[in-house]
Every structure is written in C-alpha cells, then in structure tokens.
Image: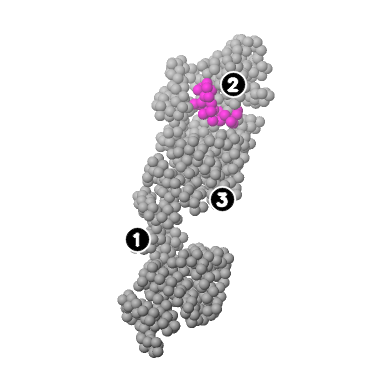
C-alpha cells in the first residue's frame, strides 16, 4: 500500500504531488525499505512524492483517494506479492484498492522490483490490462549501487518529462506542499500538454479504450485483430503527441511485436529498427525501452537466420544491460541467452558454451534451479556438448534437467519430453541401447497421449526408437515403426518432405539388411527420384540413396543395372565432394567390385589401385578402408594367377590388419588365408601349410569348429598335405571337415561334396579302392542331382570312380561309366578339352588291356 510523506493535516488541504508511490511492504518490511530508498532518490531529483513512511493513521482509504486524485502520476512497484494482492486480493486490500482507483484516474507507470516478474505476459488482471502494454522501468537490480540507481532513475525522469511532469528545482521547503500549477504556466512544453488535454479530452479516453482492446487481443494471441487497432492508435498519437513521443513509440513497439508473433519479420524488422533509433535519440541508448526494442530487432534477425546482424545487436544490448541493470537481472541474462543461441545455431559451440554456462549459473542463483528459464538454459548447454559429441558432459545435464522438469512441469510436459528425448539420443550415440530404448519408448507413448500420434515430435521419437532396433539388427521390430512413421509423415508433411524420405530410406535399409531386395529396391528407387527432385541430383542424400539402390542390384548379381548407377554416383561425388572424399572413394571401390565380379580385371585393377592410393593419402595406410581396397586389388591379381603381385599385397595387408584389428580378427585371418592360397597355387607348401594351420586354429577358437571359414581353411590344409602325399595327415582332416559340413551345410552342399571328393582321392592314391569307390559313387550321384549330369565336377567325379574300377581290373564297370563320361565331355566341352582327352586315353588303355577279357 502507499500513503503520503506529509502529515494528515497537510493531506486534508488537497496537496498536489508529482508521483504517488504504490508498493507492498513485504513480509519483513524489506520491500518497503527498498522503495523508501528509491523515494528519497526521486525526491532528490526535485519531485514531490506521495509515500507512506510513518504508516498512515486515521481514514486510510480517504487519504489514499485524496492522494491519487491530487497526483500527476501513479507509480506501481511490481513484485510478485504486489501483483497477487492487486489481482487476487479482497476489496479491503489497500494495494488493490489504490491500484484499481488510480487506473481510472491518472497515468500509471510500472517500476519492476522483482526480476521474476519481468515477463509482462505473466501480468494478469487489472495489472496486465493497465500496464501490460507499456514498457516498464527496471529497478530489479542492486539499488545500493548508486551508479545503477542514478542511471535507472534517468529513465524514470525521461518518462515523467514526456508526460509533462517536471521536477521542482526549489529547495525542499513547505513550498512543495503548494499547488504546483505555476510550473506548468512557466513551462511551454507543460503548457502545451495542458492545452492539448483541454482541447482533445475525448481523444485521450478513446486511445485508452482502444489500447485496452488491443492489449486483450494481443494477450489472447489474436495478433491479426490487434494490428489495425494499434495502427489506429499510432495515427492518433502521432498527430497529438508526435512520432518521437514515448507513447507513440511504445505503441509502435507493440505493433511490431504483433507482426513478430505472426512470424512476419519483414514487417516487424523495420518498425523495431526505426523505434529503436528514435528511442535512442529521445531516451538514450542505455534506456530500458531502447534496449528492449533493440533486443526484439535482434530476435527478428535471429528468426530469419541472419546471425551477422543479430549477433552484434545482442552483444551490444547485453553489454549495456550489464552496465545499466547489472549482470544478474533477467533482462541481461535473456539477451545473453539469445547471444549464445546465435553462436549455437552457427555451430560455434566454443563461444556458446561459456555464455550458456554463465547464464545458467546466474539464473540458478536469481530464479532458482527449478525455474523454467534456468532449466531451458541448461538444456541448451547440454545440447552444445551433445553436438560436440561430449556425451560425458551432456548426459548428466540432460538427466538432471529432465528430472527437475518432471518435478516442476510434469512428466507429460513438452519440455520434459524433449529433454528426455535428448537424453535418449546421448545413450543412442554411445550405442547404449539398453538405456536409450525404454526412454524413447516412454517418451513416444506420452507424446502420443499429449500431442497426438501424428505430431512431428511423436513421430521423431518413434523414428529414433526404430533406429535403436535397427542398430541392434532387430528388423522385425524396426520395420513396422519405420513403416508407420513414414506413412504418418507422408500424410502430415507430404511424401517429398525430407523427414518422410529419410524414414522411408531407413525402412528400405531394413529390407536390404534382411536381403529382401524385392521390397528394398522400389523404395530406394522412389526415394532417390523424389530426392533428385527436391534436393537435386548432386545432393549427398540423393547420391547415397542411389548408391544403396545399386547395392541391391549388386547383391542380386545384377551388374548390368548396378554398374551404371555406381558409375554415375561416383562421378557426381567426385564433382561435389572431391575425388579424395571418403564417400567418393567408397563408391568407386564398389564400381571396381562390380567389374571384379564380372571377371573384368582390366577395368577393376586401375580403379582399386587408384582408390587405394587416395585412401592411403586421405585416411592413412592402416585404415580399414585402405586395407580392404588393397585386399581386393590383390584378389584381382590372384584370380589372374599373378601370385607374384598378389603375395606382397596380401602379406602387407595381413600384417597391418594384425596390428590394427588383432591377429584373431576375421578380416586378418581371411587375408592370411588368401596369402596361403597364393603359396599353395605356387606349390610352395612349406609356406602355405603353417599359415593354413595357424589360421585354422585361430578360426576354431574365434568362430567355432563348425564355421564355414574354419572348415574351408582346414580343407585347404588337408590339400597341402595331400599334394605332399602326406595322406596320414590329410585323410583325418578331410574326414572331420566332411562330417562337420554335412551337419552344418547339408550332405548335398557343394562344399561338403568337394571335401568328400578329396577324401576319396586320399583313399584312391593309397590304393584303398574299397573306401574310395562308395564315396566317389555317392558324390557323383549327388552332383548329378545338384549340378546336373553334364557338369564338369559331376563328370570328373565319375571319371575317378571309373578309375577305381579300372585299378581293380573291373573293366566292365569301368568302361560302362567311362564311355558315358567321355560321350558327355565330348558333347559339352569338345574333343580337345583336357578332361575329354584324359578320359579318351584311359578308355583306350582299358580297351587294350590284356585283362579286359579276363586273361
């Protein structure tokens, strides 16, 4: 409440005052002492004040009414408690009574004492209606700082001067209790004000009424309806007060705010700019109104992503607010918060982090650790760390902010769910799906309930939930989520929206990883075409989609379709990303693989060679991409029987992989397997055998004794012994490998049959035809079934079966088989084929044998 600083006797004489100070004493009188200090400072400027210092006695209501009726301006000192009393108090509450009465009688000015009330959108009831549309004087800083207090009171003095209220420069005597109209007579500005008020009294009331309507519309978010009212007020104020008057500029500020809230920055920006310049000229560059307007101008630029213009304004306003208000008031902190956002949105986290950190700490001190502004600031600090992949710092902040938001805002509030979404992303990026999954799941369910199943926040959370399943190869769970999210995004965002296409891209990836190319291909194809249309044919997402489409064709051995796509993608990546970019090199690697798989080594080799050199330069000689390319280059030489070139490459790659991946890694062992195969094909069993032996043992240990790689290696080890006529070592290995292959691959699999073929050969070469014959016979029959009766391997197996019978002098059976084999080889391969010639020679030998007729 408020009362006069004079005695009751003098009050009854209808004393005229300049300002009436209305405030709440506070629970312990602290607020009253604060206003008392401000009152003394205002009096020191020469103003006559109405202020309760002795607590009024007698008829308080009558004295309050007298004071309000005989003052020129009513100043409300805004605190949370004062606001509650005015808005929610009873009719007997003096704060409410004097404010309600004053709002109908005299001009009102708001002076902010409580930083938690700095957002005028939070001002309700008559406080909001009367003062919510006006710029306030901020005295929420440290008023014990004389420099700060003096500077802020200059703003009040300018505000009062603009209203025709001037300080009394006479000494403080009983003259201050006299009617002060004489000052208006002597001052031409004041005289004009009085004359204007006398000539257009209805215009002033009309403006106030329109202001109230515009304010209510603005507070209810009806920006379009408020705009013409503000425009009408501005016309009237410009005519009566002038374009530089504080009230005119104040109205124009709120007109620009309407455009701003409609996201019409094209209209808002020039108004804020002009108002800011005029306020700088009339009130000064450090006045709170000037700084507020320039802050909004910077926000206009920020929301248009024009950080070059926004940054220096936020920076300058922040420095001036720090000087004028102090570093802790919410105005200062809010400006610095948006300055940090400018840096954040430009990915300059090094500059953003210390500002977010400092603002967060100060807001924790001034507003409390659970205040929405404090938590929002700390959220963005964590986001900076997240984008720097510093999950160690980001995770605990997101966790703490999320818990506090759950406590203060509720578990279903959008801010809470956004924070928990980011916490889950931290765990996701660290491959901690056990923690990420349940958070994404819970957040998605709550967003579905609060926002709806089609809301983009809901769909984005479910998208990442699907990614958790995808990254764990759980495509059964990932597919229906990607599918549903894609359909909903198609409906809400459109089929060509980047998020829709990204979701469908990963749906296709699920099918690709399941080898379901029939489903993957049309999606990759459609997404690629739409991305070509929306992003352009050279965009990295377009190219990567087409790369995956080619991958589908490649996996189906459809090189005719895969090759031109990969070729085109590689050229475009070379143009857009550069020839040394990892994506370009990866694409060209697969182009070479297409040629390799078609046995076109002439085209494959120079590409592998060039890519390998560029990867060595760009990634390093030990990088897995580099080693993989060189591995396939060696394979090109191997497949052309050029072991002299293949061996040093396999050897070098094997050693580097041993160093980088470890001696037991599958890629290391595979490389060493093919190195041994080179030696084997050179008949250098002394080098091949120990490598096959070592690789086989390591594969048994790491992959298991039944793994296909293990069995292939042991098969080759057995062949080494076989080719050295060491059947004692070869036979049990072939025997064991064949049994395991029968169990894992099946008795008809070609690997199984090939191993059993060589097992039979071991027996054959040891003249143990009794054991060899049933194996050759069985393998021959199964190959007839699986490969066909004219296949080279089928005929070769039957040739050796005939040889067994021949060696046992069973010419009748031998000739019967061999004649059929010879006939088929002649028909299939021709009479000059090595196998045909060999069968012909054996058949000739049989026919000339003295034992043919039983002699």
Q: Is residue 618 above or below residue 650?
A: above
Q: Within 10 Å of the Cα at label 3, are there few (<14), some (14-19), or many (20+) other Cα atoms?
A: some
Of 203 and 730, nearer the camera is 730
Give residue 79's position: percent from left, percent from top: 60, 26
> Which numbered disc flags the more N-terminal residue, 2 or 3?
2
Residue 835 x %, y %: 37, 79
Q: Is residue 753 above or below residue 812?
A: above
In the picture, the disc for residue 359 is none
Front residue (pair 808, 781):
808
Task: Decide which of tag 2 and tag 1 comes sooner along the chain.
Answer: 2
Going 63% across and 36% down the picture, which residue do you hit? 365
Within the magenta stretch, is there residue 128? Answer: yes
Colour setting: one colour
Q: Are marks 2 and 3 in contact (CB under 8 Å)?
A: no
The label nearer to you, 2 versus 1, is 1
**Residue range of the region highlighted in magenta in the rendering:** 113-139
Viewer-proximal residue, 321 or 55? 55
Residue at the disc numbered 1: 561
Horizontal side, residue 103 vs residue 483: left or right: right
What residue sits right under mark 2 in the picture? Answer: 85
Residue 759 in the image: state x and y as whole percent: 49, 75
Residue 258 occupies which quadrant of the picture?
top left
Question: Which quadrant of the figure contains the C terminus?
Answer: bottom left
User: Which residue in the rendered view is the most extreme toward the front?
Assistant: 854
Q: Distance between the Cα atoms at labels 2 and 1? A: 78 Å
- SS label for mark 3: loop
Query: Is residue 490 visible to us here?
Result: yes
Res. 175 in view: no
Q: Measure the alpha-carbon separation of dots 2 and 3.
A: 52 Å
For the residue labelled by badge 2, is the local secondary structure a helix, a strand or a loop? helix
Q: Which residue is mark 3?
A: 432
For residue 449, side relative to residue 824 (left or right): right
């Amino acid at each position: 409440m408020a009362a006069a600083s004079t005695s009751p006797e003098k009050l009854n004489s209808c004393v005229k005052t300049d300002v009436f100070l209305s405030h709440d004493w506070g629970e312990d009188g602290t607020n009253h002492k604060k206003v008392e200090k401000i009152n003394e400072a205002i009096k020191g400027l020469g103003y006559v004040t109405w202020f309760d210092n002795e607590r009024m006695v007698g008829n308080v209501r009558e004295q309050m009414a007298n004071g309000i009726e005989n003052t020129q301006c009513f100043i409300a000192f805004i605190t949370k408690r004062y606001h509650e009393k005015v808005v929610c108090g009873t009719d007997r509450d003096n704060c409410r009574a004097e404010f309600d009465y004053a709002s109908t009688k005299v001009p009102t000015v708001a002076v902010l004492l409580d930083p938690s009330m700095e957002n005028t959108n939070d001002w309700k009831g008559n406080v909001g209606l009367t003062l919510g549309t006006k710029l306030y004087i901020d005295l929420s800083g440290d008023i014990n700082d004389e420099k700060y207090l003096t500077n802020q009171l200059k703003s009040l003095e300018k505000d009062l001067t603009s209203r025709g209220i001037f300080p009394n420069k006479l000494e403080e005597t009983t003259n201050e209790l006299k009617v002060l109209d004489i000052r208006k007579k002597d001052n031409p500005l004041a005289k004009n004000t009085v004359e204007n008020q006398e000539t257009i009294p209805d215009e002033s009331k009309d403006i106030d009424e329109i202001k109230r309507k515009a304010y209510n519309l603005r507070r209810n978010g009806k920006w379009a309806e408020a705009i013409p009212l503000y425009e009408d007020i501005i016309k009237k104020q410009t005519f009566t007060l002038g374009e530089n008057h504080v009230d005119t500029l104040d109205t124009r500020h709120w007109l620009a705010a309407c455009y701003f809230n409609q996201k019409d920055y094209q209209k808002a920006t020039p108004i804020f700019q002009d108002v800011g310049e005029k306020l700088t000229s009339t009130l000064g560059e450090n006045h709170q109104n000037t700084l507020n307007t320039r802050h909004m101008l910077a926000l206009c630029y920020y929301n248009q992503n024009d950080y070059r213009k926004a940054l220096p304004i936020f920076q300058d306003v922040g420095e001036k607010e720090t000087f004028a208000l102090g570093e802790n008031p919410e105005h200062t902190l809010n400006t610095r918060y948006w300055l940090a956002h400018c840096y954040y949105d430009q990915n300059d986290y090094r500059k953003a982090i210390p500002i977010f950190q400092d603002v967060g700490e100060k807001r924790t001190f001034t507003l409390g650790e659970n205040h929405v502004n404090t938590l929002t600031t700390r959220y963005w600090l964590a986001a900076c760390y997240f984008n720097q992949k510093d999950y160690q710092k980001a995770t605990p902040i997101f966790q703490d902010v999320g818990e506090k938001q759950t406590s203060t805002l509720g578990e279903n509030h959008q801010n809470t769910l956004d924070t928990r979404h980011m916490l889950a992303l931290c765990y996701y990026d660290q491959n901690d799906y056990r923690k990420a999954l349940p958070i994404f799941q819970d957040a998605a369910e709550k967003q579905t309930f609060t926002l709806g199943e089609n809301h983009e926040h809901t769909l984005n959370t479910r998208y990442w939930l699907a990614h958790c399943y995808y990254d764990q190869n759980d495509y059964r769970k990932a597919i229906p989520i990607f599918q549903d999210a894609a359909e909903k995004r198609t409906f809400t965002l459109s089929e060509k929206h980047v998020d829709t296409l990204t979701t469908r891209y990963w749906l296709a990836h699920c099918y690709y990883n399941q080898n379901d190319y029939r489903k993957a291909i049309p999606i990759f194809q459609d997404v690629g075409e739409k991305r070509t249309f929306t992003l352009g044919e050279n965009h990295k997402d377009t190219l990567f989609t087409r790369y995956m489409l080619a991958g589908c064709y490649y996996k189906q051995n459809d090189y005719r379709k895969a090759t031109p796509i990969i070729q085109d993608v590689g050229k475009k990546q070379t143009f857009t990303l550069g020839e040394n970019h990892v994506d370009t090199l990866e694409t060209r690697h697969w182009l070479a693989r297409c040629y390799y798989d078609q046995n076109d080594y002439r085209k494959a080799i120079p590409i592998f060679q060039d890519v390998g050199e560029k990867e060595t330069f760009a990634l390093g000689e030990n990088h897995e991409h580099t080693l993989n390319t060189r591995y396939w280059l060696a394979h090109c030489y191997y497949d052309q029987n050029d072991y002299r070139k293949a061996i040093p490459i396999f050897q070098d790659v094997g050693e580097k992989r041993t160093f980088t991946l470890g001696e037991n890694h599958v890629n290391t062992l595979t490389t060493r397997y093919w190195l041994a195969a080179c030696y084997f094909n050179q008949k250098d069993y002394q080098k091949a055998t120990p490598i096959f032996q070592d690789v086989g043992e390591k594969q048994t240990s790491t992959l298991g004794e039944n793994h296909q790689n293990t069995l292939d290696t042991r098969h080759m080890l057995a062949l080494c012994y076989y080719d050295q006529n060491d059947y004692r070592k070869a036979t049990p290995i072939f025997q064991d490998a064949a049994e395991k292959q029968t169990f894992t691959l099946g008795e008809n699999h070609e690997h199984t049959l090939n191993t059993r073929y060589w097992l039979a050969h071991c027996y054959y070469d040891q003249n143990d035809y009794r054991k060899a014959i049933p194996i050759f016979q069985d393998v021959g029959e199964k190959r007839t079934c699986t490969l066909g009766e004219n296949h080279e391997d089928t005929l070769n197996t039957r040739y050796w079966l005939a040889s067994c019978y021949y060696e046992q002098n069973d010419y009748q059976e031998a000739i019967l088989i061999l004649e059929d084999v010879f006939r088929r080889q002649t028909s299939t391969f021709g009479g000059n084929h090595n196998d045909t010639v060999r069968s012909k020679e054996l058949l000739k030998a049989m026919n000339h044998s003295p034992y043919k007729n039983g002699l």
